[in-house]
Amino acid sequence: MDRRNFLQASLTVPALAAVGCASPDGPRPMAVPRGDRVLFKGGLLLTMAPVSKVLRGDLLVEKGKIAAIAPSISAGDAEVIDASDRILMPGFVETHRHTWQSCLRHLGANWSAAQYFQFNFFKFGVIFRPEDVYAANLIGRLAALDGGITTLLDWSHIQNTPAHADAAVAALRDAGARSVFAMGWPQAPNPAIWISKSTTDIPDDIRRVRKQHFSSNEGMVQLAMAGRGPDFAVMDQVARDLRIARELDIRTTIHIGFAVAGGIRAMNDAKLLGPDITHVHVRDSTDDELQMIKDSGGTASISPLDEMLRVRWRRGLPPVVRSVQKGLVVSLSCDSESTSAGDMFSIMRSTLSVGRVEAANPPDSRPEPQNFNAANSITTKRLLEMATVDGAKTIGQEMRIGTLEVGKDADLLMMQATSLLYYPMQDPVDAIVAAADTSAIDAVFVRGRAVKMNGRLVDIALVNRARRLATESRQYLFDKTGYKPA
């Protein structure tokens, strides 16, 4: 069924009753499933798969994987969840977040880019203890999970000691979600030596971390290299970072095209580009450079919300339209909660807004397009793809997550179909991208396990522990630096 026919079907009286009109008091409470066979009955399914054969029906989960999707499935001995007034969709996949900064949330809501580096790196980063990394990663990962981000790439450049890396990994695992630990460099004793035309080798502790914590490229938490692109380091160092990652058989993610122009071209000339690299920001990258990423099989991760909140060195907009029009695999990122919101709904809406402003203000004399959506490739559906299936492709896990398909891991969200944020709902994709927020998420499942039900994370004791540790860490950081909030 195509989208137009789906809309016609969804607006009929029986269909509206099925999404919850028959329940005027809102969604019914759900019991937390405990077994390994769970049947979701009668849900509105946004599979995000290339060909969606079922748009309303049942979804069966067995042993953490999607076992069947059909108009009707017999329950057998499965636990049954009535999803008739809910939307089922894949969990969000975020591909670039400095989670170690989570205890400094929104401290820099009015910072410039220069202030971001001054405070997070030179003031706070140099004094971070392993317990501060653990506290930040735990509260940050739980908050992202609460907001439906079932998979998150933790871009971690706080490896002041090996214990810092161990703490980061431990917190990601304790949070109980799917994560990628992208391991970078230290902040102490001097952040500048790693990011200002750096000629300094990143410590080789990533080899120990690979051997000790990540014996394979499987598991709920996986390893990647957070490398220095040419915005930060000389090309010999860029090549060294990539060489280590490739020796360890892990992917690499780099900041590029936001501080120094021409970095992608320089990497291309040095024959360093490849399908194992995610290029973060690409704000100042030329169309030719974006094509080079596409030709290499690489991916991009953009952060329009953070980019627009933080004053950068260069003018211009994040390349939402340009990257999509080049056919790049483009995913979304929060970047840092010290300056930006961490929920995917805010990120999607800001990306949609930036993309439409970008489309209406081309950098040359091209006339404004008459057919907006077709000309600019920025629709609500495209944004939801960036937040789900393209995120999975960015981290190399599209065979496991990103869509609701038989055989994939059951990472999924249950959204209220009757939320007053968008009720009466005309189209679920438009509603989720244009109007939803985290309050519309009833439940979150990671590999078939309920981590959030009835609007609350299930492990309340872990949440309370995370709050306590975050409070203690923030107090230490403020006391140690003498920082006094306004």
Image: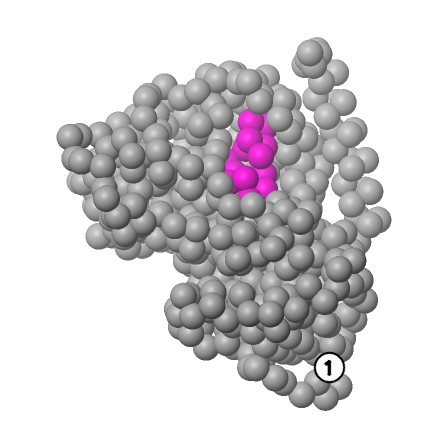
Which of these two is toward me, 396 or 35? Answer: 35
Residue span colored magenta: 333-347
Q: Residue 455: give x, y in percent of width and height.
A: 74, 53
Q: Which amino acid does label 1 sit on?
A: Ala
Residue that label 1 marks:
78
Examine the structure image and report whether residue 234 is included in the region drawn in magenta: no
At x 72%, y 88%, the residue is: 76
Q: Is residue 192 left or right of residue 161?
A: left
Does any portion of residue 155 appear in the rendered image? no
Please tell me in which quadrant of the rendered image residue 317 appears.
Answer: top left
- SS at mark 1 in the image: loop
For the N terminus, the quadrant is bottom left
At x 43%, y 51%, the residue is: 380
Examine the structure image and report whether residue 345 is included in the region drawn in magenta: yes
Spot the residue most to the front: 13
Q: Is residue 17 left or right of residue 241?
A: right
Please tell me in which quadrant of the rendered image residue 342 appears.
Answer: top right
User: Label 1 crowding class (10 Å Cα cut-off): few <14, some 14-19, many 20+?
Assistant: some
At x 53%, y 57%, the residue is: 426
Which of these two is toward me, 12 or 81? Answer: 12
How has the structure been colored for display?
one colour
Which of these two is toward me, 350 or 11? Answer: 11
Please tell me in which quadrant of the rendered image residue 150 appears.
Answer: bottom right
Q: Residue 73: give x, y in percent of width and height.
A: 63, 85
Q: Residue 255: give x, y in percent of width and height.
A: 39, 35
Does any portion of residue 37 appear in the rendered image? yes
At x 76%, y 51%, the residue is: 456
Q: Indicate whether 255 appears above or below 190.
A: below
Which of these two is toward me, 255 or 36? Answer: 36
Q: In this view, does 184 lie to the left or right of 64?
A: left
